[in-house]
Image (cartoon, coloured by chain):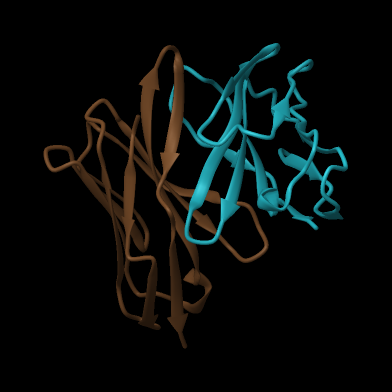
Chain colours: A cyan, B brown
Amino acid sequence: EAQVTQNPRYLITVTGKKLTVTCSQNMNHEYMSWYRQDPGLGLRQIYYSMNVEVTDKGDVPEGYKVSRKEKRNFPLILESPSPNQTSLYFCASSFSTGVAGELFFGEGSRLTVL
Amino acid sequence: GENVEQHPSTLSVQEGDSAVIKCTYSDSASNYFPWYKQELGKGPQLIIDIRSNVGEKKDQRIAVTLNKTAKHFSLHITETQPEDSAVYFCAAGTPSGGSYIPTFGRGTSLIVHP
């Protein structure tokens, strides 16, 4: 089954404790991206990757890191989480960066930073 | 960069009524306009999209219209059903430097009352 898998789905952590949210897709997609969703603000892009070893900042990259060592994986790293990073996070992928097409989203990861 | 405005933020209708959600965009280079539906506890899913060489597209009870001159596009849902209750996001896709990154609106929460 074609899918984007995120883990963990739910996480409660404390300020400053490094964490990683993993994202994996099995569709051989070139493009992958991370979004955060906050009430009233919609989906805001954090980072995106057009292919292996190519990453770029989105609209709200502060406090986050990403890496793209393999085509299928795109982890989101919070080196020192703060309460303002409490949010619902979505990973998404798309077949090609050069052609506009459907974004496939994961089920989301709800993060609470105390 | 691109800016997408979406209205209304909340829409409440009776079952069987029609629902219309409107979006405007700022970048005349945008040429791909997808709509995503997000059900409770899930990631957004593409329900319909339109490209700038088309003025209208229909798929059963949903339709999207695009006015390039005015830079606005709309989602129309006819004969609404309770299962249409969800958050809907519009987006505008702009080609830039080999990438095609969508900018999302803030979302519309549609409530269909039985």
Q: Is residue A51 above or below residue A73?
A: above
* Screen quadrant of the C terminus of chain A: bottom right
Residue at the far bottom in the pictured view:
B114
Q: Is residue A9 left or right of residue B113?
A: right
**Total numbered badges shown on the rendered structure:** 0
Asked if residue B107 lies left or right of residue B6, the reply is right
The residue closer to the viewer here, A1 or B23, is: B23
Q: Percent x, y for residue B107?
A: 44, 57
Give x and y (percent) for residue A52.
70, 13
Residue at image position (54%, 61%) is A39
Residue at x 77% of width, y 26% of height? A73
For the point 54% across and 21% down, which residue is it? Answer: A96
**Which x, y percent locates residue B23?**
29, 51
| Residue A24 falls left or right of residue A93 | right
Q: Closer to the camera, B17 or A58?
A: A58
Where does the image place residue A49, in percent across and percent down from the top left? Answer: 62, 21
Quadrant occupied by the N terminus of chain A: top right
Compared with B25, B5 (above or below) is below
Image quadrant assignment for residue A34: top right
- In which quarter of the view is residue A5 placed? top right
> Which residue is farthest left?
B69
Between B26 and B61, the one nearer to me in the picture: B26
Vertical relation: B75 (above or below) B99: below
A102 horizontally vs A13: left or right? left
Q: Which residue is found at the position 37% from the left and 59% from the top?
A: B60
Q: Quadrant of residue B20?
A: bottom left
